[in-house]
Image (cartoon, grey):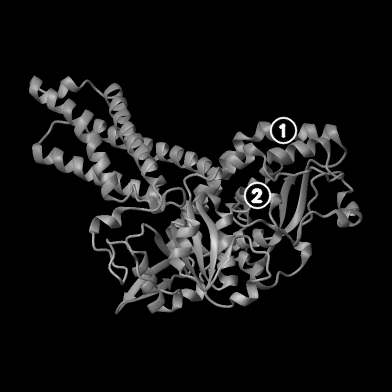
């Protein structure tokens, strides 16, 4: 993988093993320290605010105590000991682990674990000391703290994303492996800018001669010491890509070299678009086996999804009925034709259904499409034009606000669609071949990963990739996240035309 070297640092012996344990605490990048400090302050503030809410919403604390000493101990507990216990619980569950900052659900899962621990701790303390504490007050203070901690952390994550958009709070990554494998990892991490991984170079382990005349997105290195290369690029993370991780001895030696340098070592195996919950490590005699589970499109979570789909859609149709009436009047006044547009789309298991939308085009739109095909601004099975002359004046507004999609709640109630799922494709495009057919394992959705990731601005390949990722890694938490992100995307009107 790379040539080894002896370090001239007196803290290191010749095989790269750190002599001083304290040197291992020094990191090449320290942005996370400031972020962790901000989280500690936010969590402490959330716990104190939870106490303020509880004291003001529940009965007077004096009602449960006979002496001033008991009352003073109560105040000491809720104003000082309980907030500190929250910090310790969050720290103990790994909620300040820098690996989970900015992406995924793991940070919030650990907050929930800390909340469960605090519930058990307070309950145990009340039983042990036989404290006459209101159960309502306990429930309010713990629930308020959990909600506020999560809300403040979401705000902190949003701030971190804004920082990373400007190049701060990121990890500078040196990719190690063959050029095609490293380039694939480069493209993947660049798509997820919120993760804060910024590739600054590629260290080619094989086929270096074939890269010499290529126009590469980052500098390419070969034949030098990999740690020295990382130092020159000021890379704080080394990512071993694809087959380069197969040589256990080289990977182990690289890990030895990095000890004491403050640089992280990560391995990017050839398992793309597979989410973490499906991947588990099973060590067998020192061999870390990656166990990849099958997608779980069933069970209690799937039942809850179906119940939420139908109940939310029925409620939405009732609440939105005045808006539907106003939109119908606007459509009829703007251009002749029906209020709704129905088109055959492909649903679960390849079954076709009539997808409902508010009409946003003139009634001869389908006949005029053939003449506009040369102006198609997307690839794949869909036709998209930013300035499509077939769209009515009211239709432009409906598309920008995504209100034209609201009638699909009828399809959800009928069991033909879901609130969240892959985009429904037109049935006239015929049979879907290859990987595209896999998206038919689930019902199409009103919103989905492609809608919250760029909508019409995405290429066909990216849209298919996101749909397949959703199918392979579905979870109820993912659905809730997509619904939440959909609101922000609709308000920004990004990619809507």
| Residue 432 appears anywhere in the view | yes
Q: Is residue 435 above or below residue 165?
A: below
Q: Which residue is drawn at 36% across and 59% down?
A: 261
| Mark nearer the N terminus (1 vs 2) | 1
Q: Residue at x 61, y 42 (%)?
A: 489
Give the residue at mark 2.
454
At mark 1, the secondary structure is helix
**Res. 330 image quadrant:** top right
Q: Residue at x 44, y 70 (%)?
A: 293
Q: Is residue 239 above or below residue 249?
A: above
Task: Return the residue nearer the eye: 227 or 325.
Answer: 227
Q: In this view, does 26 lie above or below 432?
A: above
Q: Which residue is drawn at 43% across and 62% down?
A: 277
Using residue 285 as the reference point, say whether residue 469 is left or right of it.
right
Using residue 438 as the reference point, say whether residue 82 is left or right of it.
left
Task: Return the residue nearer the eye: 202 or 160.
Answer: 202
At mark 2, the secondary structure is loop
Give the residue at mark 1.
325
Using residue 13 as the reference point, say whether residue 253 is left or right of it.
right
| Residue 442 appears anywhere in the view | no
């Amino acid at each position: 993988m790379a040539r080894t070297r002896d370090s001239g640092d007196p803290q290191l012996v010749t095989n790269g093993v750190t002599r001083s344990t304290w040197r291992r605490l020094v990191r090449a990048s320290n942005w996370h320290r400031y972020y962790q400090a901000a989280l500690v302050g936010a969590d402490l503030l959330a716990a104190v605010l939870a106490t303020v809410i509880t004291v003001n919403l529940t009965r007077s604390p004096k009602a449960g105590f006979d002496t001033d000493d008991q009352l003073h101990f109560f105040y000491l507990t809720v104003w000082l000991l309980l907030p500190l216990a929250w910090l310790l619980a969050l720290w103990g569950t790994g909620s300040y682990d820098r690996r989970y900052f900015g992406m995924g659900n793991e940070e919030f899962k650990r907050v929930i674990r800390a909340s469960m621990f605090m519930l058990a701790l307070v309950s145990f303390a009340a039983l042990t000391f036989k404290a006459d504490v209101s159960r309502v007050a306990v429930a309010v203070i713990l629930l308020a703290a959990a909600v506020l901690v999560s809300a403040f952390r979401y705000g902190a994550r949003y701030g971190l994303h804004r920082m990373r958009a400007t190049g701060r709070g990121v990890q500078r990554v040196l990719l190690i492996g063959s050029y095609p494998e490293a380039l694939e990892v480069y493209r993947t991490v660049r798509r997820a800018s919120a993760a804060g991984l910024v590739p600054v170079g590629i260290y080619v382990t094989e086929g270096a001669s074939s890269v010499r005349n290529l126009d590469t997105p980052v500098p390419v290195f070969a034949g030098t010491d990999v740690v020295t290369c990382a130092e020159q690029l000021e890379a704080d993370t080394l990512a071993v890509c694809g087959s380069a991780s197969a040589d256990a001895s080289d990977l182990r030696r690289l890990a030895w070299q990095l000890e004491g340098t403050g640089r992280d070592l990560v391995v990017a195996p050839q398992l793309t678009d597979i989410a973490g919950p499906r991947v588990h490590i099973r060590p067998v005699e020192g061999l870390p086996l990656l166990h990849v589970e099958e997608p779980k499109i069933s069970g209690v979570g799937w039942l809850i999804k179906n119940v939420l789909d139908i109940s939310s859609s029925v409620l939405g149709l009732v609440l939105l009925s005045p808006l539907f009436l106003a939109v119908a009047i606007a459509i009829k006044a703007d251009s002749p034709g029906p209020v709704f547009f129905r088109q055959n789309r492909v649903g679960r298991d390849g079954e076709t259904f009539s997808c409902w939308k508010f009409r946003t085009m003139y009634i001869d739109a389908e006949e005029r499409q053939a003449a506009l095909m040369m102006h198609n601004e997307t690839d794949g099975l869909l036709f998209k034009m930013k300035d499509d002359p077939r769209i009515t004046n009211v239709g432009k507004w409906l598309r920008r606000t995504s209100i034209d999609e609201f009638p699909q709640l009828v399809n959800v109630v009928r069991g033909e669609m879901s609130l969240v799922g892959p985009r429904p494709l037109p049935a006239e495009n015929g049979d879907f071949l290859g990987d595209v057919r896999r998206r038919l394992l689930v019902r199409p959705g009103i919103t989905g990963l492609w809608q919250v990731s760029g909508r019409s601005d995405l290429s066909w390949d990216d849209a298919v990739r996101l749909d397949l990722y959703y199918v392979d890694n579905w979870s109820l938490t993912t659905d809730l996240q997509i619904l939440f992100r959909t609101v922000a995307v609709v308000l920004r009107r990004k990619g809507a035309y």
